[in-house]
Each structure stands twice: as C-alpha cells, then as structure tokens.
C-alpha cells in the first residue's frame, strides 16, 4: 500500500507539472492579449498599456511569466487583472457558494440513481422499468435551460415565492428564518442539477446490472439455490460497481466546475459563473488558476478511485 501511494504521488506530481505548462501555454496562445481588451476606450492610452504590461510581467518572456505566475500563486500574491483582488480569495468565496449546490446535487444523484437503476434491471420489462426509462429519456432530452425556466415559472406562480439568488431580497429576520430562506433558494437549483444526472446515471446502472446478471457465475449462483436478493445485491451489484468507481472519482472536479447555466439562470454567484466571466474578460490569472485546481482535483479523484477498486474487487491488487 505505502509503495503504491508514494509511486502514485510522484507520477501525479509529474503529470501536474506538465499540465501546468500546457495550460499556461495554451491560454497565452489565444489571439490578442489583456492589454487589448478595450482598445476603444479613449483613456486606454499607450502609456497605460505599457504600465499594465510591466505591472503584470507581460513584457517578459513566456517562461519567465510562467515562473512568476506560479510563484505568486503559491505565495498567495497572485491578483486578478479585472479587479485587483487576490485570486485565491475570489475563488474561495465563490467555492463556498457553489459547494452547497454541489453537495446536495451529488447526494441526490448518487442516492437515487442506484435504487432506480437496480430495480429497473431486476424488473426488466415491467411497469417500473418502462416508467423509469420514459422519464430518464425525457429528462436527458429536454434542454437544461428550458427546464429551469419552466420550473421557475411553475414554482413562482404556484407558491408565490422568490427563487432567484441566494436569498430573498430585502429579507431580514432571525437566524432560523434566514437559514430556511437560504435552503429554499438552494433547493430548486440543486434538484435541477441532479435531474439530468439521475436520468443518465440510472441508465448506466441498469445496463451494467443487466450485463453482469447475464454472466455465467450469476447463473451458477442461482443453480446452487442462492437467494435472489443475495444474487442481486452481493454477487451482481459488487461486480457492477467498478465502472461507477471511476465515475465517482471524476465527480470531484465538479467542486470547481460548478454549473454555468444553472448559476446564470438563478443568479447564483458560484464558481462556474465566475470562470465564465473570467474567460470573457480574459482574466488570465483566474482562468489558469481554476484550470490548475481542476487538474489537481482530477488527479485526486483518480487516486481515490484506484484505492476504491481494491475495496470493491478483492482480485485487484495495488
């Protein structure tokens, strides 16, 4: 176990180093540069452009910019080109806003997808399976932004309550009511983000269970008189989990990605919306930092998946 952990950390550190180089280079290969964001502004004089380039080290070679960038990033001195605020502080504030949506949406997706998918596989061709299949394809096919607007109109017209933003504008009351107001505003975006995930993941669970149920060792277990519940949940389910361990490891980068569409529609100041705005304004420090953190989370997720493989399947050895 320990040699595997050390070897994996070294390999992922080297991978992260090359990712940082590639992402930094690709960002700077984009046409134009930050000093050309608003050339029509009459106050954007050549002197200001020169000062801007010098202040943010854009007049130095690309490899020097790379070294200075990550030095400032790890020391906490890296600032946004848009508003001059520390990048890590901006990301942390938006991360705390997106975290509740991510946690609730992920819990709903993974706790509901498996029972629906497993029961659909066990009752293949039945009423439950056909109903689950219909709603799964319905929610997969419907555009997320359209469903969001329909849901907002339905909730507002039916319950006459606000759903936009993180809290009700002008609302001031005791702490309990403020907490309930925040939960209410968080509930609808979380359910909306989980709807598509439940539809897709439940289909994967169903197909994987059907594939495993058709294996020879499952028929052998039934021939030996093993109870059906034990066949489904002990023999079949455990072997069907391996692909989902990989998917679970790749869920972790969702912490930093957020959902641009949902956060934009519901005016939720999350990290996905901040990344979109940073790309539009060519705020390179924010974009590159988010890309670097996403790479770190992907590598952490794959590392956790490697460890979970051994728990799910004893035949796998590190």
Image (spheres, helix red, strand yellow):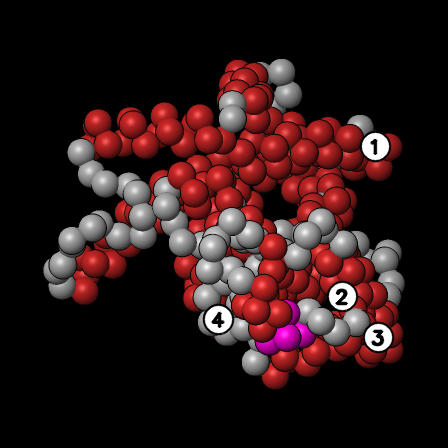
- Is disc 1 placed on a helix, strand or loop? loop
Cα gap from disc 2 to disc 1, whole angstroms: 44 Å
Q: Read off the residue under disc 2.
A: 20
Q: Which disc number belongs to residue 23?
A: none
Q: Read off the residue under disc 3.
A: 10
Question: Which residue shows up at 51% across the image and 49% down it?
Answer: 40
Q: Quadrant of residue 132?
A: top right
Q: Position of residue 232 (x, y in %)?
A: 67, 37
Question: Which residue shows up at 74% across the image and 62% down it?
Answer: 24
Q: Magenta stretch: give its range.
A: 52-57
Q: Read off the residue under disc 4.
A: 84
- Contact, mark 4 vs mark 2 (Cβ under 8 Å): no
Q: Is residue 84 left or right of residue 220?
A: left
Q: Is residue 307 left or right of residue 113?
A: right
- Contact, mark 3 vs mark 4 (Cβ under 8 Å): no
Question: Which residue shows up at 43% across the image and 27% down it?
Answer: 147
Q: Quadrant of residue 153?
A: top left
Mark 3, other Cα within 10 Å: few <14 / some 14–19 / many ≥20: few
Badge 3 or badge 4: first in the primary sequence? 3
Is residue 54 one of those drawn in magenta? yes
- Is disc 2 placed on a helix, strand or loop? helix
Cα gap from disc 1 to disc 3, whole angstroms: 38 Å
């Amino acid at each position: 176990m320990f040699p595997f952990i050390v070897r994996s950390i070294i390999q992922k550190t080297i991978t992260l180093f090359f990712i940082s180089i590639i992402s930094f280079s690709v960002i700077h290969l984009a046409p134009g540069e930050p000093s050309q964001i608003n050339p029509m502004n009459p106050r954007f004089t050549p002197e200001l452009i020169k000062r801007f380039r010098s202040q943010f080290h854009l007049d130095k070679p690309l490899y020097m910019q790379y070294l200075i960038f990550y030095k400032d990033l790890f020391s906490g001195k890296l600032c946004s080109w848009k508003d001059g605020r520390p990048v890590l502080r901006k990301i942390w504030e938006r991360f705390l806003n997106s975290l509740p949506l991510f946690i609730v949406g992920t819990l709903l997706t993974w706790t509901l997808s498996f029972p629906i998918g497993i029961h659909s596989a066990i009752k293949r061709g039945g009423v439950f399976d056909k109903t689950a299949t219909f709603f799964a394809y319905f929610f997969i096919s419907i555009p997320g932004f359209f469903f969001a607007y329909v849901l907002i109109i339905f909730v507002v017209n039916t319950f006459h309550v606000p759903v936009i933003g993180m809290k009700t504008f002008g609302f001031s009351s005791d702490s309990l009511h403020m907490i309930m107001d925040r939960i209410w505003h968080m509930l609808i975006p979380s359910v909306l983000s989980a709807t598509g995930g439940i539809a897709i993941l439940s289909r994967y669970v169903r197909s994987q269970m059907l594939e495993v149920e058709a294996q020879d060792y499952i028929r052998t277990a039934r021939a030996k008189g093993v109870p059906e519940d034990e066949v489904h949940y002990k023999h079949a389910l455990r072997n069907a989990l391996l692909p989902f361990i990989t998917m679970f490891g790749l869920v972790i980068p969702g912490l930093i990605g957020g959902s641009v569409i949902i956060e934009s529609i519901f005016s939720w100041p999350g990290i996905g919306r901040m990344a979109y705005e940073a790309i539009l304004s060519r705020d390179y420090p924010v974009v590159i930092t988010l890309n670097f953190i996403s790479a770190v989370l992907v590598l952490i997720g794959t590392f956790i998946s490697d460890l979970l493989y051994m728990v799910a399947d004893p035949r796998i050895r590190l």
